[in-house]
Amino acid sequence: MFVLEGVGKTFANGFVALRDLHLRIAPGERVALLGPSGAGKTTLLRLLNATLRPTAGRLTIAGLDSRHLHGKRLRQVRRTIGTIYQQYNLVPRLRVVHNVLAGHLGRWSGWRAALSLLHPLQLDTAVAALQHVGLADRLWQRTDQLSGGEQQRVAIARVLVQDPAVILADEPVASLDPGLAEGIVRLLVDLAVQRQKTLVVSLHHVPLARAYFPRLLALQQGRLVYDGPPQGLSAAAWQALFAEAPLPAAAERAHVRPVTAFPL
Amino acid sequence: MRRHGWSLLLGLSLGALTVWSLLDTGLSLPALLGAEGRRQMALFVQRLFPPDLSPALLRQVGQRALETLAVSFLGTLLAVGLAAGLLGGATRTLVQGAAFAEAVPRGKLRRLGQALAYGSARALLTLFRAVPELIWALLFILVVGLGPFAGVLALGVHTAGVLGRLFAEVLENVDRRPCEALQALGASRLQVFLYGMLPQALPELLSFALYRWEVNIRAAAILGFVGAGGLGQQLFVALNLFLHQQLLTLIAATLGLVILVDACSALLRRLLV
Ligand SMILES: Nc1ncnc2c1ncn2[C@@H]1O[C@H](COP(=O)(O)OP(=O)(O)OP(=O)(O)O)[C@@H](O)[C@H]1O
Ligand SMILES: [Mg+2]
């Protein structure tokens, strides 16, 4: 599905976020991406979903070199990759139904899209997707009235409607409380298993990653420092990995995201 | 130290500007508040009474007031249409396709085209709003003749310049993260606009349009001075023919109209925004 050969990403301001990544993710694989804050997890996922382009090396998505993706072809590739972000996935002022139906946009023409805002099209797909995540009764509610966890499930419903070959999730549970977190991860994993989708999830919570993913990737300061099964590294080694995080960032993180209170 | 210097410079410049403006406009307090000035004012106010409330005049004023209302409303509507038409070029994030991530390296020609589209849309908007409504009205009277239609066109064009820029800035400043998410699932530029940018921006866009309607009802009342219909035309005649008793009726009608539109606008804002 993805092949990275010496991929690097240097931002316009000169900051090197990723360097020399070699890695290959096969269709149907389930991979967890771990690493301290600032390690480059989000950047890697934005490369994989063709939002950013590598500045070094070669990234192939489903056999296509990302450097040569433009216009229509780029849209087609993006259509096959569904992404769930940590937050701000959804348009807050839109009703839930439209946020979910937005999953069709890669297939819909501009006219269909506009029409659907006035009179929702393929409503049954939205209903089915929301049923799957247990939010069928929220169809007509405004999205910003939902709680964080509910919004995350709406984002998953949108991916269900999109029906991509790959699901990427960037710390999908970082802003949720621990009880909800496991539920969301399980939802994603079940989905990937049942419908044979490739799943790449960045996580902060090592136990969750070890419990649900056969393959773990660890990033540290933009480099890949581990790629293998959960058994390959001891709990202590994981702890050491995260201890590398620069302190001020860790403190800031603890302030905004209660999830760091987890035992790592 | 440095900041102090700048504040001082700014203060002095403002002071100098004020003094120069006072001298240049020939402002004189005695002329305004002296015995002669006061006498003239009292005389003018006296002549306004009693207001002319004859049915014939009232009917005419009513008609003109409705005309003014229609001009202000249609003018604002036209402005919203024109501004919307130019938004695709005037909004930076819409011109550059991949604005929600990083600029995709594209051909030089393509970038030049984008810069040209953006530059010309913005320049057109600047031209629209730099020329005052009254001048636009004079111009359109030459084209379509005297009457309210010229007023609608004049208000429409000038206001399009104002609203176009405001709209573009609102759209450029929406939260980009939901838009990036839409782009990432394969949405086209138009779809990102419809599903991501517009819903976020709509309350502000409406609010600006309603505010401009309030401004335009005042402007529409004046447009008649140059022959573009409405209350202004009659106000102009009454002033020039010294029909002072009609004048009070007309001023009252204008005031009533302004209050009415402000109230309508407030109501709509509460309902829609
Ligand atoms: N557009 C950008 N321009 C410059 N630097 C950036 C940009 N985006 C991200 N970075 C930097 O790249 C580094 C990696 O960022 P990234 O968001 O990928 O980290 P992360 O592993 O997802 O961290 P977190 O766990 O905090 O989300 C950070 O230091 C960040 O400041
Ligand atoms: Mg991140």
Image (spheres, coloured by chain):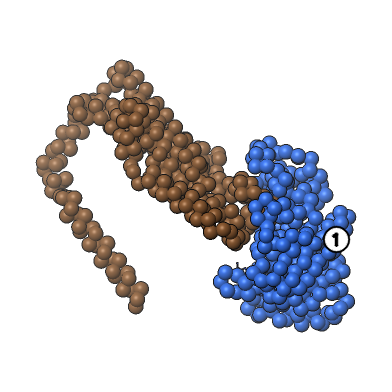
Q: In which quadrant of the rendered image does the N terminus of chain B lie? A: bottom left
- In this rendering, would B154 be left or right of B78? left
Residue B254: x %, y % from top left: 34, 32
Q: Quadrant of ligand 1?
A: bottom right
Q: How many marks?
A: 1
Question: Residue visible at 42% across and 34% down?
Answer: B75
Q: Position of residue A150 (x, y in %)?
A: 74, 54
- Quadrant in the picture for residue B56: top left
Q: Is residue A1 left or right of residue B56?
A: right
Q: State yes or no: Cβ of the residue under disc 1 lies below 8 Å from any atom of ligand 1.
A: no
Q: Judge left or right: residue B235 versus residue A73.
A: left
Chain of the residue under the numbered disc 1 shown in the image: A
Kind of residue at disc 1: Gly
Q: Secondary structure at mark 1?
A: loop
Q: Relative to B248, does residue A51 appear above or below in the rendering?
A: below
* Residue drawn at point x = 71 percent, y = 68 percent: A58
Residue at image location 80% in from the left, 62% down from the top: A1
Residue B120 at least partly seen: yes
Is residue A227 or residue B50 the one in the foreground? A227
| In the depicted structure, whether residue B135 falls above or below residue A52 | above
* Shade of chain A as shown in the rendered figure: blue
Q: Where does the image place residue B194, in percent across and percent down from the top left?
A: 61, 45
Chain letter for the part of the structure drawn in brown: B
Q: B98 or B61, which is in the foreground?
A: B98
Q: Vertically, is A243 above or below A119?
A: below
Q: Which residue is mark 1?
A: A28
Q: Nearer the viewer, residue B41 or B119?
A: B119
